[in-house]
Image (spheres, rainbow, N blue to C red):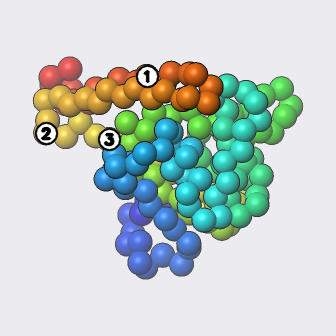
């Protein structure tokens, strides 16, 4: 678990934590990371009708009270005086795992973490020269397509 600002064992943490690992992400039949998060009890994904702007609520707290991190770095979003919180504009093929901490973490991260924290951990290049993922999804309800291509590799190769 990395949301404590230092590595710790999941079993030793006093917080309610759930991790979506890479194997779960790969085997999932869900169309997006939002659908995977929606499967976690106490996590709700809301849509405010802005493209790609699905937002995370934890245990009923507004999305502006849920801190979003990517590799431990805070992601912020401000829009003309409105406090919408951060959307879910992230490609799941780039993720190694997702850590969801339910409950207040404001002592470590401030008032934005009153509802909880979602930390997206991205894949690292590692020893592989290169690897990639190609994905295509068709939504029959909206007759819409979603495509993505991702490539990871070591800096020496790229």
Q: State if disc 1 and disc 3 touch (CB < 8 Å).
A: no
Work out whether residue 113 can be spotted: no
Q: Residues within 10 Å of mark 3 (few under 14, many from 20)?
A: some
- Residue most extreme to the front: 140
Q: In this figure, which residue is indicated by the disc labeled 1?
A: 147
Residue 86, quarter of the rendered image: top right
* Mark 1 residue element: strand
**How far from the left and from the top, in percent, is residue 112?**
71, 52
| Quadrant location, the N terminus | bottom left
Say which quadrant the C terminus sits in. Answer: top left
Q: Is residue 29 visible?
A: yes
Q: Position of residue 28 (x, y in %)?
A: 40, 48
Q: Is residue 13 left or right of residue 77?
A: left
Question: Going 59% across and 53% down the picture, which residue do you hit?
Answer: 38
Mark 1 and mark 2 lie on one chain; the one further toward the N terminus is: 2
Residue 49 lies in quadrant: top right
Helix, strand or loop under label 2? loop
Q: Marks 2 and 3, how far apart in space?
A: 12 Å
Instruction: Indicate which label's residue lies in the foreground, 3 or 1.
Output: 1
Label placed on residue 127: 2
Tell me which residue sits at (36%, 28%) in the image. Answer: 135
Compared with residue 70, is residue 52 higher up or lower down, i.e. above or below? above
Residue topped by disc 3: 123
């Amino acid at each position: 678990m990395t949301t404590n600002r230092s590595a710790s064992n999941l079993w030793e943490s006093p917080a309610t934590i759930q991790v979506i690992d890479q194997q779960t992400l790969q085997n999932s039949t869900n169309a997006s990371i939002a659908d995977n998060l929606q499967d976690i009890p106490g996590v709700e994904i809301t849509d405010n009708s802005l493209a790609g702007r699905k937002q995370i609520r934890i245990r009923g707290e507004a999305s502006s009270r849920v801190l979003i991190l990517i590799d431990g770095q805070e992601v912020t979003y401000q829009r003309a005086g409105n406090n919408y919180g951060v959307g879910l504009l992230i490609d799941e093929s780039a993720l190694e795992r997702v850590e969801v901490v339910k409950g207040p973490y404001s002592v470590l991260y401030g008032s934005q973490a009153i509802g909880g924290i979602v930390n997206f951990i991205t894949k690292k290049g590692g020893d592989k020269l290169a690897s990639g993922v190609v994905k295509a999804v068709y939504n029959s309800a909206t007759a819409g397509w979603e495509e993505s291509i991702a490539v990871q590799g070591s800096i020496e190769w790229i």
